[in-house]
Image (tube, grey):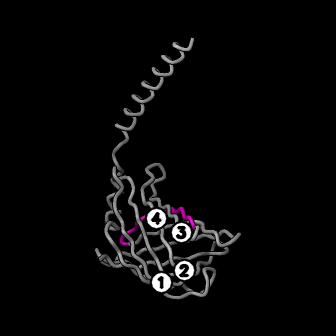
Amino acid sequence: MKIRFGVLTCVTLVVGMALMARVQGEMSKPAPELKKLDYFAGTWSAEGEVKPGPMGAGGKFTGTNRVEWMDGGFFLVTHSDFNGALGKGMETAYMGYDSDEKVYTYDSFNSLGEADHAKGNLEGDTWTWQSETRIGARTMKARLTIKMLLATAYKFKFEMSPDGITLNTVLEGKDAKK
């Protein structure tokens, strides 16, 4: 009985691995839309200002973003260091594309305990990312807008809405490629 069970388990495992390899072979090409994220690849120097409000008293901040493609070309990975009005910390983010929903995805996690999961699109030279952000016990709608100025520079603005309608600027700044 044990031998039959062992053989059955082994056959099931081999068949399962063969099916997985076949499915991965058929689905292993990154979506063409991901090429638009190439713009962000490289090392960027950020600077900006946090506005007084739900994120604190406000003030200047600086940061460095190191952005590269993950093996396979499905996700762009950003490793960031920041310092200033938000404190000192690190963040890791992943940008990709959801072919089913036809939207770009952005998932970030930082050393301040924050996580963000946004969906975005590109129209002309402007990226717009929508998400929900928690400030304490409160959930707010959020929007990050990135306007590409040159191949080596963009400006950004992060806004939040406590009522889901009126957007208030929380921080804004610019990034320049090193």
Task: Say whether marks 3 and 1 touch (CB < 8 Å).
Answer: no
Indicate which disc, 1 or 2, sits on the residue closer to the N terminus.
Answer: 1
Q: Within the image, what quadrant is residue 122 found in?
A: bottom left
3 or 4: mark nearer the eye: 3
Query: Residue 54 at x, y = what percent?
Result: 63, 80
Residue ID for mark 3: 111
Please name the amino acid that badge 1 sits on.
Phe
Indicate which disc, 4 or 2, sits on the residue closer to the N terminus.
Answer: 2
Residue interval drawn in magenta: 114-125
Residue at point 62%, 78% (across, down): 166
Q: Residue furthest top?
A: 1
Task: Say whether marks 3 and 2 touch (CB < 8 Å).
Answer: no
Q: Which mark is residue 61?
A: 1
Task: Give the Cα separation between the discs numbered 4 and 2.
Answer: 16 Å
Q: Which mark is residue 92?
A: 4
Task: Say whether marks 1 and 2 touch (CB < 8 Å).
Answer: yes
